[in-house]
Image (cartoon, grey):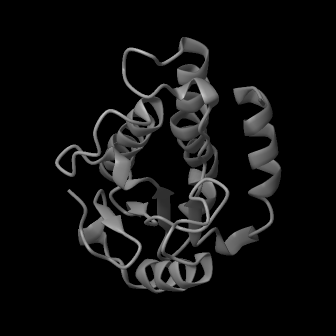
Amino acid sequence: MLTAKQVGEILNQVGQIPGAAGLDYLIQNAAIVCSGDGDNSLTLEASSFNDIMSTNVLGPALIMKHMHPHLAKSFRPVIANLTSGLASIPKDFGARSTSYSISKAALNMLTYKQAKTCPEMIVVAVHPAWIKTDMGTDKAPLEPGHVASEMVQLLQNVTLSDSGKFMRYDGADVI
């Protein structure tokens, strides 16, 4: 894993690419699951929990921090933090994937706090649904291309009134 200083140095270099026009979209798709995630809150392991939180929450926080000056130059900056329906308490997915679920719930709160800190930017938490990926497995019902296409449309149409929300890739609110 990179240190916070290394991340900052890399992002400062990347931030020079858009130039004077700034960065219009920042899509943060950080997510890991570790073997020590635990089937429930009594079996999680501290090292796995810390790695998951560092990647799934601290990573997007630091990236936003370092990319903010470049986003601020944009006429309509949109930040999408990719989250998970497993972060929803009302949906009740049970005890599984404890660390991952906690990290995505924390990412949703980070999204809300970023939206409040940067009211001139559109910051949303987007649940991409269950997709056929390495993490989602081939049992998932949705293809990545379909979800990506829908998500592009969503991000082109979100407004400041959507900022801070937890929504699905197709724009439906998630509770």
Q: Residue furthest front?
A: 139
Residue 140 to residue 103: above or below: below
Q: Nearer the viewer, residue 92 or 60?
A: 92
> How many marks overall?
0
Q: Quadrant of the C terminus?
A: bottom left
Identify the residue at the far left of this view: 90
Whole-percent x, y for residue 83 in the image: 44, 53
- Left or right of residue 167, residue 99 in this image: right
Q: Is residue 117 visible in this depiction of the protein?
A: no
Residue at horizontal 62 percent and vertical 45 percent from the top: 63
User: Which quadrant is home to the N terminus?
Assistant: top right
Quick check: 98 left or right of 135? Answer: left
Picture quadrant of residue 124: bottom left
The image shows residue 50 at horizontal and vertical percentages of 56, 21
Q: Position of residue 42 (x, y in %)?
A: 38, 14
Residue occupying the point 41% across, 63% down: 126
